[in-house]
Image: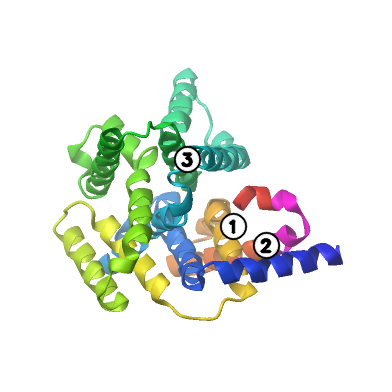
Amino acid sequence: MLSSIRSWKNKACETAVKDIPGIDIFKFIMAFAVILIHFPPVFDIGHEIYPEVIRWLIRLAVPFFFIVSGYFAYRIINSPDKLRVRGMKMLRIWAIWMLIYFPLQLYSGFPDAKSVVVYIINVLLYGEEAYAWPLWFLYAQAIFFLIESFLPNRQRLRAFVHIIYICALAASSLYLLHSDLFPKLFTYTPQCAFGGCGFILCGYYLKKYEANIKINRYIFAALLLCLSYVLRVLTMPLWELTGGLALIIIALAIKCKPRPTFLTMRHESAWIYYMHMYVLMLLSLVIFTNGASKGIIISCAFVISFALAWLLTKLQKRSRMFSYLVS
Protein backbone atom coordinates (compact mmCIF):
# COMPACT_ATOMS: atom_id res chain seq x y z
CA MET A 1 0.00 0.00 0.00
CA LEU A 2 2.81 2.43 0.87
CA SER A 3 4.47 1.78 -2.47
CA SER A 4 1.22 2.53 -4.31
CA ILE A 5 0.86 5.80 -2.39
CA ARG A 6 4.44 6.80 -3.28
CA SER A 7 3.76 5.89 -6.90
CA TRP A 8 0.65 8.05 -6.91
CA LYS A 9 2.59 10.97 -5.41
CA ASN A 10 5.36 10.61 -7.99
CA LYS A 11 2.80 10.49 -10.75
CA ALA A 12 1.13 13.54 -9.22
CA CYS A 13 4.37 15.51 -9.42
CA GLU A 14 4.95 14.51 -13.05
CA THR A 15 1.36 15.21 -14.10
CA ALA A 16 1.24 18.58 -12.34
CA VAL A 17 4.42 19.64 -14.14
CA LYS A 18 2.95 18.81 -17.52
CA ASP A 19 -0.46 20.34 -16.79
CA ILE A 20 -1.62 23.86 -16.04
CA PRO A 21 -2.20 24.79 -12.36
CA GLY A 22 -4.51 27.69 -13.22
CA ILE A 23 -6.93 25.35 -14.94
CA ASP A 24 -6.97 23.02 -11.93
CA ILE A 25 -7.74 25.98 -9.67
CA PHE A 26 -10.61 27.14 -11.87
CA LYS A 27 -11.98 23.61 -12.19
CA PHE A 28 -12.17 23.41 -8.42
CA ILE A 29 -14.02 26.73 -8.17
CA MET A 30 -16.39 25.95 -11.04
CA ALA A 31 -17.33 22.60 -9.50
CA PHE A 32 -18.98 24.54 -6.67
CA ALA A 33 -20.66 26.79 -9.24
CA VAL A 34 -22.37 23.69 -10.66
CA ILE A 35 -23.79 22.98 -7.21
CA LEU A 36 -25.33 26.45 -7.27
CA ILE A 37 -26.83 25.72 -10.70
CA HIS A 38 -28.52 22.51 -9.57
CA PHE A 39 -29.63 23.65 -6.11
CA PRO A 40 -32.81 25.54 -7.23
CA PRO A 41 -34.38 22.79 -9.39
CA VAL A 42 -33.76 20.11 -6.75
CA PHE A 43 -35.54 22.25 -4.16
CA ASP A 44 -38.19 23.38 -6.65
CA ILE A 45 -37.33 27.06 -6.49
CA GLY A 46 -36.30 29.51 -9.20
CA HIS A 47 -32.78 30.69 -10.04
CA GLU A 48 -34.05 34.17 -9.15
CA ILE A 49 -32.76 33.51 -5.62
CA TYR A 50 -29.36 34.57 -6.99
CA PRO A 51 -28.47 38.07 -8.20
CA GLU A 52 -28.30 38.36 -11.98
CA VAL A 53 -24.49 38.56 -11.98
CA ILE A 54 -24.23 35.31 -10.00
CA ARG A 55 -26.70 33.57 -12.33
CA TRP A 56 -24.54 34.65 -15.26
CA LEU A 57 -21.24 33.59 -13.67
CA ILE A 58 -22.31 30.13 -12.53
CA ARG A 59 -23.71 29.39 -16.00
CA LEU A 60 -20.16 29.73 -17.37
CA ALA A 61 -18.97 26.69 -15.40
CA VAL A 62 -19.95 23.88 -17.79
CA PRO A 63 -18.87 25.82 -20.92
CA PHE A 64 -15.51 26.30 -19.20
CA PHE A 65 -15.23 22.54 -18.59
CA PHE A 66 -16.03 21.79 -22.23
CA ILE A 67 -13.55 24.35 -23.55
CA VAL A 68 -10.84 22.90 -21.31
CA SER A 69 -11.61 19.46 -22.74
CA GLY A 70 -11.17 20.79 -26.29
CA TYR A 71 -8.00 22.64 -25.30
CA PHE A 72 -6.35 19.44 -24.10
CA ALA A 73 -7.70 17.44 -27.07
CA TYR A 74 -5.59 19.52 -29.46
CA ARG A 75 -2.95 16.82 -29.94
CA ILE A 76 -5.42 14.06 -30.82
CA ILE A 77 -7.98 15.99 -32.87
CA ASN A 78 -6.45 14.81 -36.15
CA SER A 79 -5.95 11.22 -34.99
CA PRO A 80 -9.15 9.17 -35.56
CA ASP A 81 -7.92 6.21 -33.50
CA LYS A 82 -7.08 8.34 -30.46
CA LEU A 83 -10.36 10.24 -30.80
CA ARG A 84 -12.24 6.95 -30.89
CA VAL A 85 -10.44 5.71 -27.78
CA ARG A 86 -11.21 8.97 -25.98
CA GLY A 87 -14.86 8.82 -27.03
CA MET A 88 -15.31 5.23 -25.88
CA LYS A 89 -13.59 6.09 -22.60
CA MET A 90 -16.09 8.91 -22.03
CA LEU A 91 -18.96 6.53 -22.82
CA ARG A 92 -17.62 3.99 -20.32
CA ILE A 93 -17.37 6.55 -17.52
CA TRP A 94 -20.81 7.93 -18.44
CA ALA A 95 -22.39 4.44 -18.35
CA ILE A 96 -20.91 3.70 -14.92
CA TRP A 97 -22.22 6.97 -13.50
CA MET A 98 -25.64 6.33 -15.05
CA LEU A 99 -25.76 3.11 -13.05
CA ILE A 100 -24.64 4.95 -9.91
CA TYR A 101 -27.46 7.47 -10.37
CA PHE A 102 -30.10 4.88 -11.32
CA PRO A 103 -31.36 4.59 -7.70
CA LEU A 104 -32.41 8.24 -7.92
CA GLN A 105 -34.29 7.40 -11.11
CA LEU A 106 -36.03 4.58 -9.24
CA TYR A 107 -36.83 7.07 -6.47
CA SER A 108 -38.51 9.29 -9.08
CA GLY A 109 -40.41 6.21 -10.22
CA PHE A 110 -41.84 4.77 -13.43
CA PRO A 111 -45.57 5.37 -13.00
CA ASP A 112 -46.53 3.89 -16.39
CA ALA A 113 -45.16 2.42 -19.63
CA LYS A 114 -44.92 5.86 -21.20
CA SER A 115 -42.51 6.99 -18.50
CA VAL A 116 -40.21 4.09 -19.38
CA VAL A 117 -40.17 5.20 -23.02
CA VAL A 118 -39.45 8.77 -21.95
CA TYR A 119 -36.61 7.51 -19.77
CA ILE A 120 -35.02 5.63 -22.68
CA ILE A 121 -35.33 8.72 -24.92
CA ASN A 122 -33.75 10.89 -22.24
CA VAL A 123 -30.83 8.49 -21.91
CA LEU A 124 -30.20 8.12 -25.65
CA LEU A 125 -30.81 11.69 -26.80
CA TYR A 126 -29.89 13.73 -23.78
CA GLY A 127 -27.41 11.48 -21.94
CA GLU A 128 -29.06 11.93 -18.56
CA GLU A 129 -31.74 10.62 -16.24
CA ALA A 130 -33.61 11.94 -13.21
CA TYR A 131 -31.27 13.99 -11.01
CA ALA A 132 -28.26 12.89 -13.10
CA TRP A 133 -28.08 16.18 -14.96
CA PRO A 134 -24.28 16.54 -14.72
CA LEU A 135 -23.79 13.40 -16.79
CA TRP A 136 -24.67 15.05 -20.11
CA PHE A 137 -21.20 16.60 -19.89
CA LEU A 138 -19.64 13.15 -20.36
CA TYR A 139 -22.17 12.12 -22.99
CA ALA A 140 -21.64 15.27 -25.05
CA GLN A 141 -17.87 14.76 -24.97
CA ALA A 142 -18.29 11.19 -26.18
CA ILE A 143 -20.56 12.39 -28.99
CA PHE A 144 -17.99 14.94 -30.13
CA PHE A 145 -14.97 12.63 -30.06
CA LEU A 146 -16.79 9.78 -31.79
CA ILE A 147 -18.22 12.01 -34.53
CA GLU A 148 -14.81 13.52 -35.16
CA SER A 149 -13.18 10.08 -35.26
CA PHE A 150 -15.52 8.85 -38.01
CA LEU A 151 -15.50 12.00 -40.14
CA PRO A 152 -13.72 11.54 -43.50
CA ASN A 153 -10.66 13.73 -43.92
CA ARG A 154 -12.46 16.15 -46.22
CA GLN A 155 -12.09 19.80 -45.41
CA ARG A 156 -15.50 20.94 -46.66
CA LEU A 157 -17.38 18.17 -44.87
CA ARG A 158 -15.57 18.84 -41.59
CA ALA A 159 -16.25 22.56 -41.96
CA PHE A 160 -19.95 21.82 -42.51
CA VAL A 161 -20.12 19.63 -39.39
CA HIS A 162 -18.30 22.28 -37.36
CA ILE A 163 -20.85 24.86 -38.48
CA ILE A 164 -23.56 22.53 -37.20
CA TYR A 165 -21.74 22.44 -33.85
CA ILE A 166 -21.81 26.23 -33.62
CA CYS A 167 -25.49 26.37 -34.65
CA ALA A 168 -26.34 23.83 -31.95
CA LEU A 169 -24.34 25.90 -29.48
CA ALA A 170 -26.26 29.04 -30.45
CA ALA A 171 -29.58 27.19 -30.12
CA SER A 172 -28.57 25.94 -26.68
CA SER A 173 -27.53 29.43 -25.62
CA LEU A 174 -30.81 30.95 -26.83
CA TYR A 175 -32.82 28.20 -25.17
CA LEU A 176 -31.59 29.22 -21.73
CA LEU A 177 -32.98 32.71 -22.34
CA HIS A 178 -35.98 32.00 -24.64
CA SER A 179 -37.09 28.45 -23.87
CA ASP A 180 -40.68 29.30 -24.81
CA LEU A 181 -39.71 30.05 -28.42
CA PHE A 182 -38.37 26.60 -29.33
CA PRO A 183 -39.92 23.14 -29.72
CA LYS A 184 -38.85 20.87 -26.87
CA LEU A 185 -37.17 18.20 -29.02
CA PHE A 186 -35.24 20.81 -31.03
CA THR A 187 -33.87 22.55 -27.97
CA TYR A 188 -33.16 19.65 -25.66
CA THR A 189 -31.11 17.79 -28.26
CA PRO A 190 -28.55 20.59 -28.82
CA GLN A 191 -28.66 21.43 -25.12
CA CYS A 192 -27.56 17.92 -24.15
CA ALA A 193 -26.36 15.54 -26.86
CA PHE A 194 -24.70 18.14 -29.11
CA GLY A 195 -24.58 21.20 -26.88
CA GLY A 196 -20.97 20.60 -25.87
CA CYS A 197 -19.52 20.09 -29.36
CA GLY A 198 -19.20 23.79 -30.15
CA PHE A 199 -17.47 24.51 -26.84
CA ILE A 200 -14.98 21.66 -27.32
CA LEU A 201 -14.27 22.83 -30.86
CA CYS A 202 -13.55 26.35 -29.62
CA GLY A 203 -11.19 24.96 -26.99
CA TYR A 204 -9.28 23.23 -29.78
CA TYR A 205 -8.99 26.45 -31.79
CA LEU A 206 -7.95 28.40 -28.69
CA LYS A 207 -5.04 26.03 -28.23
CA LYS A 208 -4.21 26.21 -31.92
CA TYR A 209 -4.12 30.01 -32.11
CA GLU A 210 -3.38 31.14 -28.54
CA ALA A 211 0.15 32.18 -29.55
CA ASN A 212 -1.46 34.79 -31.80
CA ILE A 213 -3.10 36.56 -28.84
CA LYS A 214 -0.83 39.59 -28.53
CA ILE A 215 -2.96 41.63 -26.12
CA ASN A 216 -2.50 41.20 -22.35
CA ARG A 217 -4.35 38.01 -21.39
CA TYR A 218 -6.15 39.56 -18.42
CA ILE A 219 -7.33 42.54 -20.48
CA PHE A 220 -8.49 40.20 -23.26
CA ALA A 221 -10.37 38.04 -20.75
CA ALA A 222 -11.98 41.11 -19.16
CA LEU A 223 -13.21 42.24 -22.59
CA LEU A 224 -14.67 38.77 -23.25
CA LEU A 225 -16.39 38.75 -19.86
CA CYS A 226 -17.93 42.15 -20.56
CA LEU A 227 -19.07 40.94 -23.97
CA SER A 228 -20.55 37.80 -22.44
CA TYR A 229 -22.54 39.76 -19.87
CA VAL A 230 -23.80 42.25 -22.46
CA LEU A 231 -24.90 39.41 -24.74
CA ARG A 232 -26.78 37.80 -21.88
CA VAL A 233 -28.48 41.03 -20.88
CA LEU A 234 -29.50 41.57 -24.51
CA THR A 235 -30.64 37.90 -24.65
CA MET A 236 -28.27 37.18 -27.53
CA PRO A 237 -26.61 33.81 -28.25
CA LEU A 238 -23.02 32.73 -27.55
CA TRP A 239 -22.76 34.58 -24.23
CA GLU A 240 -21.74 31.28 -22.61
CA LEU A 241 -18.98 30.74 -25.17
CA THR A 242 -17.39 34.16 -24.72
CA GLY A 243 -17.63 33.85 -20.93
CA GLY A 244 -16.17 30.35 -20.90
CA LEU A 245 -13.30 31.46 -23.13
CA ALA A 246 -12.60 34.34 -20.73
CA LEU A 247 -12.33 31.97 -17.78
CA ILE A 248 -9.88 29.62 -19.47
CA ILE A 249 -7.76 32.54 -20.69
CA ILE A 250 -7.51 33.79 -17.10
CA ALA A 251 -6.65 30.27 -15.95
CA LEU A 252 -3.91 29.99 -18.57
CA ALA A 253 -2.49 33.35 -17.53
CA ILE A 254 -2.10 32.35 -13.86
CA LYS A 255 1.55 31.71 -13.08
CA CYS A 256 2.34 29.42 -10.18
CA LYS A 257 4.66 26.51 -9.56
CA PRO A 258 3.19 23.09 -10.38
CA ARG A 259 2.81 20.84 -7.34
CA PRO A 260 0.89 17.66 -6.45
CA THR A 261 -1.76 19.78 -4.72
CA PHE A 262 -3.15 20.80 -8.09
CA LEU A 263 -3.63 17.20 -9.16
CA THR A 264 -5.48 16.60 -5.91
CA MET A 265 -7.69 19.63 -6.59
CA ARG A 266 -8.39 18.28 -10.07
CA HIS A 267 -9.61 14.96 -8.68
CA GLU A 268 -11.62 16.66 -5.96
CA SER A 269 -13.34 18.93 -8.47
CA ALA A 270 -14.32 15.87 -10.54
CA TRP A 271 -15.77 14.09 -7.52
CA ILE A 272 -17.67 17.23 -6.48
CA TYR A 273 -19.09 17.56 -9.98
CA TYR A 274 -20.28 13.96 -10.24
CA MET A 275 -21.43 13.35 -6.65
CA HIS A 276 -23.08 16.63 -5.66
CA MET A 277 -26.54 15.61 -6.89
CA TYR A 278 -26.68 12.84 -4.31
CA VAL A 279 -25.71 15.40 -1.66
CA LEU A 280 -28.43 17.80 -2.80
CA MET A 281 -31.04 15.03 -2.86
CA LEU A 282 -30.08 13.98 0.67
CA LEU A 283 -30.34 17.56 1.88
CA SER A 284 -33.72 17.95 0.20
CA LEU A 285 -35.01 15.00 2.21
CA VAL A 286 -33.36 15.76 5.54
CA ILE A 287 -32.76 19.48 5.99
CA PHE A 288 -35.18 21.29 3.72
CA THR A 289 -38.15 19.61 5.35
CA ASN A 290 -37.06 21.17 8.66
CA GLY A 291 -37.31 24.68 7.26
CA ALA A 292 -33.60 25.50 7.02
CA SER A 293 -32.64 28.67 5.17
CA LYS A 294 -31.33 28.50 1.62
CA GLY A 295 -27.95 29.85 2.69
CA ILE A 296 -27.52 27.08 5.28
CA ILE A 297 -28.53 24.40 2.76
CA ILE A 298 -26.06 25.67 0.16
CA SER A 299 -23.31 25.86 2.78
CA CYS A 300 -24.05 22.29 3.84
CA ALA A 301 -23.99 21.17 0.21
CA PHE A 302 -20.57 22.78 -0.27
CA VAL A 303 -19.09 21.29 2.92
CA ILE A 304 -20.49 17.78 2.44
CA SER A 305 -19.58 17.66 -1.25
CA PHE A 306 -16.02 18.73 -0.50
CA ALA A 307 -15.68 16.28 2.39
CA LEU A 308 -16.95 13.47 0.20
CA ALA A 309 -14.60 14.50 -2.62
CA TRP A 310 -11.67 14.62 -0.19
CA LEU A 311 -12.45 11.10 1.05
CA LEU A 312 -12.92 9.68 -2.45
CA THR A 313 -9.67 11.27 -3.60
CA LYS A 314 -7.89 9.56 -0.70
CA LEU A 315 -9.45 6.26 -1.73
CA GLN A 316 -8.46 6.92 -5.32
CA LYS A 317 -4.81 6.99 -4.25
CA ARG A 318 -5.16 3.47 -2.90
CA SER A 319 -7.39 1.80 -5.47
CA ARG A 320 -7.50 2.09 -9.24
CA MET A 321 -11.18 1.19 -9.14
CA PHE A 322 -12.01 4.75 -8.12
CA SER A 323 -9.84 6.18 -10.90
CA TYR A 324 -12.10 4.54 -13.48
CA LEU A 325 -14.91 6.86 -12.39
CA VAL A 326 -13.17 10.18 -12.97
CA SER A 327 -10.32 9.62 -15.45
The mark closer to the camera, 1 or 3, is: 3
Residue linked to disc 3: 139
Residue 299's spot in the image, x, y percent? 51, 69
Name the amino acid, label 3: Tyr
Label 1 element class: helix
Residue span colored magenta:
312-322
Q: Based on the displayed image, in which of its 4 quarters is residue 15 positioned?
A: bottom right
Q: Quadrant of the N terminus?
A: bottom right
Q: Earlier in the sequence, mark 1 or mark 3?
A: 3
Residue 22's spot in the image, x, y percent? 47, 72
At 36% from the left and 44% from the top, the residue drawn is 197
Q: Based on the displayed image, in which of its 4 quarters is residue 98 positioned?
A: top right
- Let me know if residue 315 is in the magenta part: yes
At 37% from the left and 46% from the top, the residue drawn is 196
Residue farthest top in this picture = 113
Residue linked to disc 2: 313
At 59% from the left and 66% from the top, the residue drawn is 306
Residue linked to disc 1: 271
Name the amino acid, label 1: Trp
Is there any visible trace of residue 262 in the rendered image? yes
